[in-house]
Image (cartoon, rainbow, N blue to C red):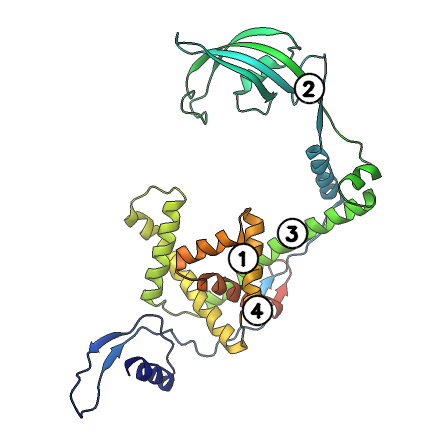
Amino acid sequence: LVPEYYANALKEADLKPVSRPEFEKKPELKRQSPLEMTLAVEVRPEIKDLKYEGVKIKDIPVEVGDSEIEDAVKTLKEKRTVYEPTEEAARMDDMVVLDYETTEGGGEPQEFKDQTYKVGQGVMPEEFSKEIAGMKKGDEKELDIKFPEDFPSPDAAGKEVHFKVSVKEVKKPVLPDLDDEFAKDVGFDDLDALKKHLGEQIKASKEASAKKMQKAELVSRMLTEYAFDAPETMVEAELYRMVAEAKQSGRTEAEEALTEELKPAAVNHVRATILLDIVGEKEGVKVTEEEAKQRVETLAAGLGMTPENIMKYYIARDGSLDGLKNEVFEDKVLDFLLERAERVKGDKE
C-alpha cells in the first residue's frame, strides 16, 4: 500500500521528487484501523513564468578558407608519405635505422639493435637528433647526451648517457604527387572532389564547435535569468560523481579540497538540469531506444571503443543507462532551444 498511496499523493500535490522518500512518522499497523503515514521528500523547485523562446545568443558565422582546405590536403598527403633508402646524409625528418650502445655513470653498457628513429621527431632529446643529422649509412659516432629533468622516462631524466651509434640505413621521405591519382587512391573521383569533401568536413566541425558554444551561452543566460536554489540531494549526487571523475583523471588533492573547488560547478549543473527537464516536459521531448543506440554507437566510434564497453561504462557509473538517456534528452532540449533562440551579431544584446 505504501508505494501506491505515496505515488497518488505526489500526483495529487503535483510534486516532482528528486530524492528518496523518508518516513517522518512510520505507519502503525492496527487491526481494523486506517493506515497513516508521513513522508518527507525533497522536490524539484518550481519556476514560474519560465520563458525560453527567443533567448539572445551570439551569432557565430562559419566560413572555410582555401588555406584551411590546402592545410587539410597537406596533412592527408603527409600521412601517405613513404620512405625510400638513400646514400645521402640523414637530415631532419628522415628515418634512420640505428644500432646503439648506451653507458651511464660507468655502469654496464646496454645494446639496442635495429632501432627506427625519425630524426627531429623521436623520443630522444633534441641534441641527439642534431648529432644524427649528417650521418650516412655505415657511419659510427660516440656522443654524450644530457637528458632533461622533465624527460618522460624517469630512468633517464636528468642523467648524462654515453652513446655509441651505428647508422645501418637512412631513408628519406617521399610525398605523393598532389593530383587526381592521389585523390583516387584515397577514394575520390578527382582532386576537386577530395577538396570539396575536406571543406565539408572542416565546415561541419566548425559548426559543431559553434553550436556547442551557443548551447553553453544559452544555458548560462537562462541560469542568470532564473534564480532558484539547487536541491541539496541532487547537488550531493553530482558532486560525488564529479569528485570521483577528478580522482580517476589523476587529481591528487584531498577530497575536501576537491569538493570545495567543484561545488559551484555541481550546483550550476544541477540547476541547468532542472531547467532543461522543465522545458523538455513542457515540450514533450522524449528519447527513443533508437536515439539512445545511436548515441552509444557515436561515442564508441569517437573513442575507439566497442558499443558494449560504452554501455558497461554507463552502467558502472550510474547503475543503468539512464545517465546516457538523460544526456540525449538534454541535447534534444538544447537543440529545441537553439532553434528558437535569437542570434545577435557582435556584442549587441
Q: Work out which quarter of the rendered image holds the C terminus and state it.
A: bottom right
Judged left or right of residue 260, residue 34 is: left
Identify the residue position indicated by label 2 in the image: 171
Q: Label 1 sits on what residue type?
A: Val
Identify the residue position indicated by label 3 in the image: 206
Question: What residue is at 35 percent from the left and 81 percent from the top?
Answer: 7
Q: Residues within 10 Å of mark 3 (few under 14, many from 20)?
A: some
Q: Are marks 1 and 3 in contact (CB under 8 Å)?
A: no
Identify the residue position indicated by label 1 in the image: 296
Percent coordinates x, y for residue 345 in the rendering: 64, 60
Mark 1 or mark 3: which comes first in sequence?
Answer: 3
Q: Label 2 sits on what residue type?
A: Lys
Residue nearest the viewer, comparing 17 with 347 = 17
Q: Are marks 2 and 1 in contact (CB under 8 Å)?
A: no
Percent coordinates x, y for residue 258 in the rendering: 33, 49
Q: Residues within 10 Å of mark 4 (few under 14, many from 20)?
A: many
Question: What residue is at 40 percent from the left and 21 percent from the top?
Answer: 155
Distance (Cα) linking label 2 and label 4: 56 Å
Mark 4 or mark 3: which comes first in sequence?
Answer: 3
Mark 3 or mark 2: which comes first in sequence?
Answer: 2
Distance (Cα) linking label 1 and label 4: 24 Å
Q: Which is in the foreground here, disc 1 or disc 4? A: 1
Q: Label 4 sits on what residue type?
A: Leu
Mark 1 or mark 4: which comes first in sequence?
Answer: 1
Mark 2 or mark 1: which comes first in sequence?
Answer: 2
Circle 1: element type: helix
Residue nearest the viewer, comparing 323 with 29 = 29
Circle 4: element type: helix
Q: Residues within 10 Å of mark 2 (few under 14, many from 20)?
A: many
Q: Work out which quarter of the rendered image holds the N terminus and state it.
A: bottom left
Mark 2 or mark 4: which comes first in sequence?
Answer: 2
